[in-house]
Image (cartoon, rainbow, N blue to C red):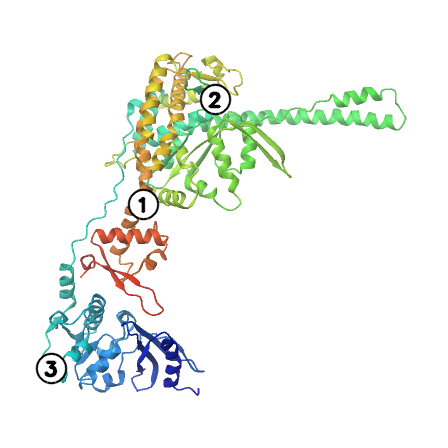
Amino acid sequence: MNETPSQAARRLAASAIRDGYRPDALHEYQTADGKPIFWRLRAKHPDGQKWIRPMRANGHGFEIGEPEFPSGKPLYHLPELIARGDDAVWFSEGEPCADALAKLGVLATTSGGADSAKHTDFSPLAQRRVNVWPDNDEPGLRHAREVSDKLIELGATVRLVDVAKLNLPNKGDCVDWLAAHPGATGADLDALPMVNYAKAERAAVAAHEWPPPQPIVTELAPVEPLPTAIIPEPYRAWIADVSERMQTPPDFLATAAIVMTSSVIGTSCSIKPKRRDDWQVVPNLWGSAIGRPSVLLKTPAMKEALNPLARLEIQAKQTHDDAQRLYQGDQEMHDAKRAAIKDQMRRAAKGKDSSNVDTLKLELSNLAAPDAPVWRRYKTNDATIEKCNELMRDNPRGLLLFRDELVGLLAGWEKPGHESDRAYFLEGWNGNQGHIDDRIGRGTTYADNVCISLYGGIQPSKLQSYLYQCMRGLDNDGLMQRLQLAVYPDEPKSWHLVDRYPATEAKNRVYTIIETLANADFTKYGAHVDDGDKFPSLRFADDAQELFYQWLTELQHKLQGEDEPVVLEHLGKYRSLMPSLALIFHLIEIADGTAQPGPVSLRAAELAAAWCDYLESHARRIYGLVTNATKQAAATLAGKIRKRKLNDGFTVRDVYRQNWHLLTDRDTAQNACDELIGEGWLREQITPAAFGQREKIAYLINPRLRPQ
C-alpha cells in the first residue's frame, strides 16, 4: 500500500471541494494499543451543511466505509482512555467536540454522530465517572440519553451538562460554548450546570414531557343478532336446537341452510320481481361464516347445516352405482351386437354372402348405444373450471361449492394460470348463463346453465388481509359483494354445557323439505315459462308486490346517499337478494305443506326484507375491516410497539420491511405512524438533508410506553 491516509483523504476530499465543501479535519480511530483502524474525513459547506465520510484501508488502498466491528465500534481517543483509567471522562457528540475538550487537558471521547450509540463498544467506560455533553437539539439529547443508558448499565456514574442553561443556539455544542468563552480551562468545565443521571429518573422526566398515549380504538361495527322470528318457520326449531347444543350463534347455521336451499332450487325456479317487466332472477346465493377459529365452531355448524345435502348425495351415489351396473350389462350387449353385425359385414365384403349388405349397414347405423347414467351431484369442495363445467352440463339445476376455508379458494383464483377461474365463478353467481369449454384433450363441453352456489368459513384476520389487498391492488369486480349472506356475529359472552339428544323430528322435517325441493317440478308450485324464458318463474302476490316496490324505492334512495363506495356496491346487489330470499322462503313453505302453490306470499316478502336489514349490519362490520384501514394498521403498529418490536428512532422502512399484517407497504406504514403521532404514541425526529443524502424522518416512542 503506497498511499498514505492523508493522501487518500485529499483524493476523497477533491470530490467534496468540487461541490463547494471545504475540508475541515481528518479524525483517526485506533485500537487500545494505538494501531490505526479507520479515519473520518469531515468537510463543511458555507451554508452550514456537513460532509462526513468514513475511510478504511482495504489492502490495496483506501475506500469509503467503516470496518466490521463484531463487538462494536471503538471509542474515539481509545488509547488515552485506557492509559488514564482513573480520570473522569468527558463524552460529546462528534469528534470535533471531543478534540476541542481534549485541548483543555481533560480526557474526552465520542462514539461519533447522533445515531452512533447503538453500534459502539462502551466497555472501556465501565465503572468510570463520565460527564456527557449533549448537542442542543432533539437528536443531541436523544444521543446523550442513549449513551447514558448504556453507561449506567456498565456501572458508570453519569452526569449530564444541562445545556438548557448554557444559552446555546439551536444545535449548539461544546465548540460553540468554548468559542463564546475564550480562555476557558478544564477547571471551568467543572463549574458547568450538571444533572446527575439515572435511567429510571430520566425515563420519568422524559415521560412527563409527553402526553399520555391515547388508546387506539378499533372496535368492530355493531351487528344485529339474528332474530329467531325471521328464520323460516320450518327451519326454526332445527336451527335453534343445533345452535344451542353447539353453543354457537344461529347465524352460521341459518345462512348455510339458506344457501344450501338455494342450491337445490337453482335454475329450476326463478322469480320475476316486477309485475310486468321481464327481469328474471335465479335465486342463487353466496355466503360465508366469519369468526375466529375454534371459538364459534364455524366448521361444525356449517357441516351440520349441510347434512340434508349430504343425505341426498348418498342417495344419488347409490342410485348412480346401481344404474352403472345395469349400464355395463347394456354396454356389453351393445358391443356384442355391434361385433356380430360387423362380422357379417366382413364376410359380405369378402364375397361370401353379399345379399344383405344394405340391410347390415342400416342395422349397424340404427344400433344405438345405451346412455351412460348421469350421477346427480349436489355439492363439490374443489374442482377445476373444466371439471366444474362438466358437472354443470350434467346438473343444470345448479351445484353448491363448499370450502371450509373460503379465502384459500378466493386467493387461488388470483394465482397465475387461474385468471379465467374468477370470471367463470362470477358468471356462475348469476345462474342464467351457459358456458362452452373447448380443450384439445377434452374436446368441447357445453353447459346450458352455470349456476354455482358458494359457502364457506373465513377467519377475520385472513379476510381483512384479502379484502385490503383486493380493494387496493386488484380490480374490484364485485366478487366480495356477491357474498350477500356473509355474517360476522358477536362472540357469545357466556357458555354453558348442553348435552341432550338432537331434535330428530325437527331435523327430519328439514331433510324432507330439501329432498322435496331437489326433485320438485315447480310448474306444480305455480311457476310457468313465458315466451323466450329459459326457466320457469313465479311473481309476487299483489300485497307482496307493493311491499317489494316500497322496499326497492327505499334501497335506491340509500344507494344515492353518502356512504363508503364499497358498501354501496354491496347493497346494490340487494336488488336481487330480496326477491331471491322471498322466493326461497315461499318454496320452503310450499314444500313443507304450510303454504299453497302460487305467487310469492306477503309473509315470505316480509321475511326477505327483514333479512336484508339484518345482513346489511353484518356487511358494514365486514367492510369496516378495510374502510377504516388506517386505524386498523395503527392498531397493529401499536401492538408491535407494545411488544418492543421496534426501537426508539425507527423509520417507516423499518415498519413495512417486516411485512406485518396491514403494514406491508410504505403508504400504509406511513399512515399508521401519522395516526400514532396524533394519538401521542410517537413524535417525528427530522434530520435535515445533507450532501448526498435525503432528509431523514425517524420516530421517537413515547417513554410512557416503555417499561421502566
In the image shown, does 302 or 18 lie closer to the viewer? 18
Indicate the secondary structure of the residue bearing disc 1: helix
Residue denoted by label 3: 188
Of the residues shown, which amino acid type is indicated by label 3? Asp
Q: Residue shown at 28%/59% (left/top)?
A: 646
Q: Residue shown at 20%/78% (left/top)?
A: 175
Q: Residue shown at 34%/49% (left/top)?
A: 662
Mark 2–mark 3 distance (CA, rounded to whole Å)? 99 Å
Q: Nearer the viewer, mark 2 or mark 3?
A: 3
Residue 624 percent location from the top left of the image:
31, 40
Of the residues shown, which amino acid type is indicated by label 2? Ala
Question: In the rendered view, does 415 fall on the left or right side of 299?
Answer: right
Say which label, 3 or 1, has the lower sequence index.
3
Residue denoted by label 2: 518
Regarding residue 701, the answer to whether it shows in the image is yes
Instruction: Characterize the local packing of mark 3: few (<14), some (14-19) or many (20 or more) Cα atoms within 10 angstroms.
Output: few
Q: Residue shown at 35%/32% (left/top)?
A: 252
In the image shown, does 389 or 278 lie closer to the viewer? 278
When asked about the image quadrant of residue 392, the answer is top right
In the image shown, does 106 or 68 lie closer to the viewer? 106
**Which corner quadrant holds the C terminus?**
bottom left
**Which corner quadrant holds the N terminus?**
bottom left
Q: Nearer the viewer, mark 3 or mark 1?
A: 3
Indicate the secondary structure of the residue bearing disc 2: helix
When asked about the image quadrant of residue 8, the answer is bottom left
Residue 476 percent location from the top left of the image:
42, 39
In the image shown, does 350 or 125 lie closer to the viewer? 125
Whether residues under marks 1 and 2 lie with C-beta atoms below 8 angstroms apart, the answer is no
Of the residues shown, which amino acid type is indicated by label 1? Ala
Q: Is residue 207 above or below residue 439?
A: below
Residue 230 percent location from the top left of the image:
31, 23
Residue denoted by label 1: 629
